[in-house]
Each structure stands twice: as structure tokens, then as C-alpha cells.
Image (cartoon, grey):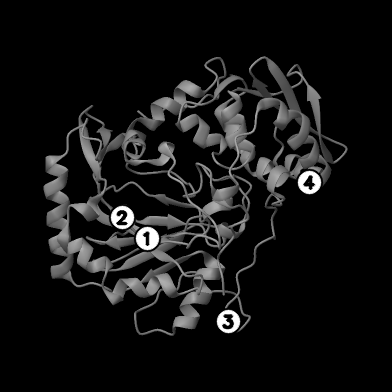
Amino acid sequence: MTIDQRTRRHRDRHAFERDEVFDDMIPRALSDHGEIAGRGIEHTGLPALGLEVDGRAVTLAARGGVVVATPGVDDAGVVADLADDALSDLVTDRQSTMGLAMTSRVRLTAGNMNDWIGWEPVLRALFDGRRVHEPGDVTLSGLDGEPLDVGRSFTLDDDREEIAHFLTEAGFLHIRGVFDEPEMATIAADIDEWIGRATPDDDESWWAEDAAGATRAVRVLFFHEKSVALRGLVEDERFTWLGGLTGDGHRHDGGAEGLVKPLGIVKGLSDLPWHKDCGQGMHSYMCNSLTCGISVTGADRVSGALGVIPGSHRANTMATGRDPALDLQPIVLETRTGDITVHCSDTLHRAHPPIERPRKVVYSGFRLPPLPGDEIRPDPRYDRRARAALSDVQDRIEAADNPDDARRYRARR
């Protein structure tokens, strides 16, 4: 079994200039994948995409079932203004359409953010050859060949082959009763302590705003450095076995974040909408990593349970938001204290807002090992300070959108 979908190596990273992309990469991509990308445009109904880069522009559109490129943006329904280094990162999957917006590297001058991020699966089809998902492309089957029971959960005593097969097929897991209540009480106390210590400018926390206009810390970054108890749990064999499930050699990433989910949050990154963890880019370099949620207080339908879309890790679909045409159906993972959820980095998931009780959870996980001969170099756009700066990402996305479009992005308030 494998969930390794990587097709690019970090060592091959190259900064392409505008003319290299326009005159070489795009024509080659049109020749190699123009048909499947054109099918993706027709299936999604997206407007033509215009790319304006340092005084030169090109428009991508579907004609006769294939993608064609024409100079200028007169016929484009959505137009993105970006620098050549941002264009390079876009076509090589270093950053996605949404990733560029989140880091203030794109500005829309026509159309709106919905269409811009809607183009992401088509761009991956064009440059990576990944077919845009269509209804019926993904089926979920058990080891016996029968339809998979996506509502199933497991315990530490269940058959590991069945668990691994479920993860490979569905893209997530719910493991019951991994840790006990006293262990979780200790972790909860550590989260409370560090939430209490957080300040808006500490570069180690995320903040959100409630209906009364009060800001509050909702996530402790680098929690593994702060909680001795948490470090012990992620080194415990009750947790570490998850990294060996698929045989891909996943390694613990050495990190963790402690979250609280308060009631009444109206703005900020607390109750995240549908997204994939590769939604900022890097799918072809990292997927699939495994994100593990340790249920410190448990979560049900009134306390902010995790939502997942089974099989979505196998679908080239929107990675930030849920495509209304997606035929895969979401479910809610209701957990008790000490349970663990696991989801692949390419699985669509969301945090449902709690409506009666708040909850606490810790996220940690496992990454794939480097491919043979690969070299992973630090990227400042994903360093510690950049991670902390995501607390204000909704405002940056709003600023990147076209202010003259009625469907422009608005940060939740």
C-alpha cells in the first residue's frame, strides 16, 4: 500500500523567468496536457485566465476541448497580476493560487478570488498532468471488494492491514481510546497555560475575533517545545505506529500545535473552512503527509467536530473550499477524549464551529522521507515567523482580490 503521490523533487527547484514560462513551459504544457486541462475547464465552467507579469500578458482558455494560449488579457474573465518569481512558483507547484494570495504575491484586476482559486486544479492538470476530478472518478472499496463503510472507526487492537487499507482508500482514520483521561487533562492544562501566556505579537500564536469584537488566542504554535507531556505522547508507541501504516516510511515531523475552539468566533483562523493541507501549494513535493489530531477534550456535532470528505485525497479538486459539483460526500468525525483522527494532507477537511461547548485538540503528524538523492532546503515563506503570520491571512486574501467584483472575497466578520 502507498499514499505517496509525489512527482517532483525539491532538488530540481528552479526559478523560471517570465519569458521562459510564457515561451517554453506553457507551450510544452499545452502540447503534453492541453486536452485533459481543457476538459477540466469545460467541466468546471471556469472563465479564461489572464496572467499579467511585468508588462507582458497571456490568456489561457479552452477552445475545442483543448487549452490554448493567446497574448494579452482582453478575453480573460479573471486576471492575475504577479511578478515573475510568483509565476515560476505557480507553474512549478511551489505555491498555489491561494498560496500566492495568502502571501500577498498576487493581485486580481478582473474576476474574483473564487475563480482564481478555482483554476488551481486546472493548472495542476496543465503542468502536472493530473486529471481534474469528475463524478465517478473515485470509488471506495473495502479489502473484500464491497463498498467501504466510511463511518467505521478503529482501536489499537484492530487489524493493521485493514486500518492501512481504510486510510489508503478514504484518506482518513478515527482511532478510539488511544490515550486516557488523566493524560489528556495534563495536555489540556498545558494548552491553557500557553494560551494564557500568548500575546498578539509573540510570533508563536494565532488569534481570532469573537462576535463582541474581542480578540483571543486560539492556537499555540510550536507546542511540542512547550509541553513535556506532549513530547512524551508523540514518542509513545500508541502514537508512533501510525507512521508505519502504509509502508511509505513516514517520519514524525517533530512538531505540534495546541488548539482551543471557543464559541462565537466570527473572524480569524479558528474554525477553518474546507481545505487541503497542500492548499497553499507543494502537493507534488509533499503528498501525502499525515496530520494527526489528538482529541484532548473530544468533539461532537455541538462542540466543533472535524469534518472530512472520504476519498478526496484521490481527487484533483479545489484545495481551498469545496467545489459545489464535487460528488464525494462529507462526514463528521465525532471523537471522545483520548481518540486520534488522522487525515492525509490531500484530504479535504474542515473544523466545524462549536455551538454549545468549546473543545481542545493537538495536531501533530508524519511526513514522507526525502526521495532518494533529494535535498530539502528551507523556504522562508514557510518558516516559523511565516507560520505565525498566517493569523492575519484573511485580510491579505481580501486585499489580493478585485475590489470591483461583487463576488470578491471578504474576511469573515
Q: Earlier in the sequence, mark 2 or mark 3?
A: 3
- The disc, 2 or 4, on the residue closer to the chain's N-terminal end is 4
Element at label 1: strand
In this picture, is 313 found above or below 143?
A: above
Residue at (17, 34) in percent of width and height: 199
Q: Which residue is under mark 4? A: 33
| Label 3 with label 4: CB-CB less than 8 Å | no
* Circle on res. 143: 3
From the viewer's perspective, tell me whether residue 174 is left or right of residue 45: left
Please report whichever mark, 1 or 3, sits nearer to the chain's N-terminal start.
Answer: 3
* Circle nearer the viewer, 2 or 3: 2
Work out whether residue 355 or residue 96 is closer to the camera in this orientation and state it.
96
Residue at 56%, 39% in the rendered image: 96
Quarter placement of the C terminus: top left
Question: Residue 293 at what x, y percent from top left?
Answer: 33, 60
For mark 1, what is the residue? 365
User: Could you tell which of marks 4 and 1 lies nearer the N-terminus?
Assistant: 4
Q: Residues within 10 Å of mark 1 (few under 14, many from 20)?
A: many
The residue tagged 2 is: 255
Q: Residues within 10 Å of mark 4 (few under 14, many from 20)?
A: many
Residue 294: percent from left, percent from top? 29, 62
Q: Amino acid at mark 3?
A: Leu
Cα gap from disc 3 to disc 4, whole angstroms: 34 Å
